[in-house]
């Protein structure tokens, strides 16, 4: 029998996730199917291509943010007379935001689903 993945997409708690993963492991062991086999059986389609495009766009914009910030901070260091420590702290704030954004985003994605959150992120960029 094929491995059914929809049973563990949105667990309501960590305990439910553990139980679901045990079921998936048991199903995979019984049918001797590995993840690669399941993915080969499912195949890819328009949905997967759209997810790759959206995620790629978000990653490009994230990289551009870091590139632009480092360029601007170089100019600001001279005009605002910033020390190297102050410039480093200003650049580090971006990564602190990524840390907290990742934690909150992951939690919200577990609750509401990944697709709505990715679309909200992408619409917030533009």
Image (spheres, rainbow, N blue to C red):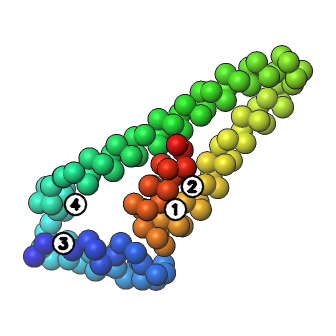
Mark 3 crowdedness (10 Å alpha carbons): few <14, some 14-19, many ≥20: many
- Which sits earlier in the primary sequence, circle 3 or circle 4? 3
Between circles 4 and 1, the one closer to the viewer is 1
Q: Residue at x 76, y 31 (%)?
A: 88
- Asked if labels 1 and 4 touch by Cβ distance under 8 angstroms, the answer is no
Task: Look at mark 2 in the image and give the residue it sits on.
Answer: 102
Work out whether 62 lies above or below 99: above
Residue 51 place in picture, x, y as percent:
33, 50
Q: Are marks 1 and 2 in contact (CB under 8 Å)?
A: yes
Q: Which mark is residue 106?
A: 1
Mark closest to the chain's N terminus, 2 or 4: 4
| CA separation in Å, label 3 and label 1 | 25 Å
Q: List x then y, in percent, for residue 106.
A: 52, 62
Q: Is residue 100 left or right of residue 108?
A: right
Q: Residue furthest right?
A: 81
Residue at disc 2, secondary structure: helix
Q: Which-is-in-front pick, marks 3 and 1? A: 1
Mark 3–mark 4 distance (CA, rounded to whole Å) = 9 Å
Residue 116 seen in the figure: yes
The residue that disc 4 covers is: 35
Q: Quadrant of the N terminus?
A: bottom left
Q: Residue at x 48, y 73 (%)?
A: 111
Q: Nearer the viewer, residue 112 or 90?
A: 112
Give percent across and percent down for residue 17: 41, 77
**x, y percent for residue 49:** 26, 47
Which residue in the structure is indicated by mark 3?
3
Q: Is residue 41 above or below residue 12?
A: above
Secondary structure of the residue carrying tag 1 is helix
């Amino acid at each position: 029998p094929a491995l059914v993945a929809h049973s563990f997409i949105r667990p309501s708690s960590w305990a439910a996730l553990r139980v679901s993963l045990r079921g998936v492991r048991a199903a995979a062991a019984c049918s001797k199917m590995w993840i690669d086999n399941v993915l080969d059986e499912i195949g890819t389609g328009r949905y997967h291509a759209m997810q790759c495009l959206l995620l790629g766009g978000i990653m490009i914009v994230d990289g551009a943010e870091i590139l632009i910030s480092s360029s601007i901070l170089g100019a600001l260091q001279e005009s605002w007379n910033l020390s190297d420590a102050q410039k480093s702290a200003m650049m580090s704030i971006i990564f602190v935001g990524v840390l907290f954004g990742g934690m909150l985003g992951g939690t919200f994605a577990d609750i509401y689903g990944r697709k709505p959150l990715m679309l909200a992120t992408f619409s917030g960029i533009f």
